[in-house]
């Protein structure tokens, strides 16, 4: 009986994961559509993706990353 319960639990977990993966794909498609719409309005999707990534970051982590980027740019002669 325990084996049957374990098999049923496993099947239910797998089915839940599959449904969530489908939802994730749908959301990813929706996000792609928004970027395409923004591009058609003259916005740069690559820059927008960078901004989205930066906004997800903690303020201190973002400042640290920007300082390191400035250091690397300066070392390579790419400063403004």
Image (cartoon, rainbow, N blue to C red):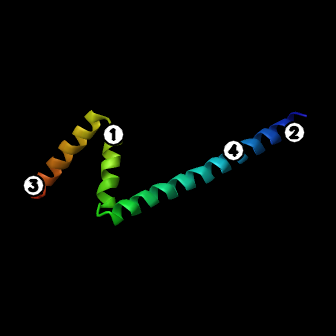
Q: Residues within 10 Å of mark 1 (few under 14, many from 20)?
A: few
Identified at 77% across, 45% down, the residue is 11
Q: Nearer the viewer, mark 1 or mark 3?
A: 1
The residue labelled by disc 2 is 4
The residue that appears at 11% across and 58% down in the rendered structure is: 78
SS for tag 1? loop
Report, in whole angstroms, how far the alpha carbon at label 3 lies from the one at label 4.
50 Å
Q: Of callouts 3 and 4, which one flags the residue occurring earlier in the amino acid sequence?
A: 4
Cα–Cα span, label 1 and label 3:
24 Å
For disc 4, the marked residue is 16
Give how far apart the Cα atoms at labels 2 and 1 are.
45 Å
The residue tagged with tag 3: helix, strand or loop?
A: loop
Mark on residue 57?
1
Q: Residue furthest right?
A: 1
Residue pictured at 82% horizontal, 41% vertical: 8
Sequence order check, earlier mark of 2 and 4:
2
Mark 4, secondary structure of its residue: helix
Residue 22, x across and y down, in percent: 62, 53
What percent of the width, then of the height, locates residue 3?
Answer: 86, 38
Disc 3 crowd rating (10 Å Cα; few below 14, some 14-19, many 20+) is few
**Mark 1 or mark 4: which comes first in sequence?**
4
Q: Is residue 70 above or below residue 2?
A: below
Tell me, yes or no, whether the two marked residues, 3 and 4, touch with CB atoms within 8 Å.
no
Residue at 56%, 51% (x, y): give it.
Answer: 24
Kindly identify which numbered label has been placed on residue 79: 3
The answer to whether the residue labelled 3 contacts the one labelled 2, judged by CB atoms less than 8 Å apart, is: no
Q: Secondary structure at mark 2?
A: helix
Residue 12: x percent and y percent? 75, 42
> Of 62 and 7, which appears nearest the observer?
62
Find the distance from the CA under tag 1 to the CA under tag 4.
Answer: 30 Å
Query: Do the residues bearing badges 2 and 1 touch, measured as CB atoms within 8 Å?
Result: no
């Amino acid at each position: 009986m325990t084996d049957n319960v374990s098999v049923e639990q496993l099947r239910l977990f797998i089915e839940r994961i599959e449904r969530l993966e489908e939802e994730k794909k749908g959301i990813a498609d929706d996000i792609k559509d928004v970027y395409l719409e923004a591009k058609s309005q003259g916005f740069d999707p690559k820059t927008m993706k960078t901004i989205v990534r930066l906004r997800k970051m903690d303020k201190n982590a973002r400042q640290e990353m920007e300082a390191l980027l400035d250091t690397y740019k300066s070392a390579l002669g790419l400063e403004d």
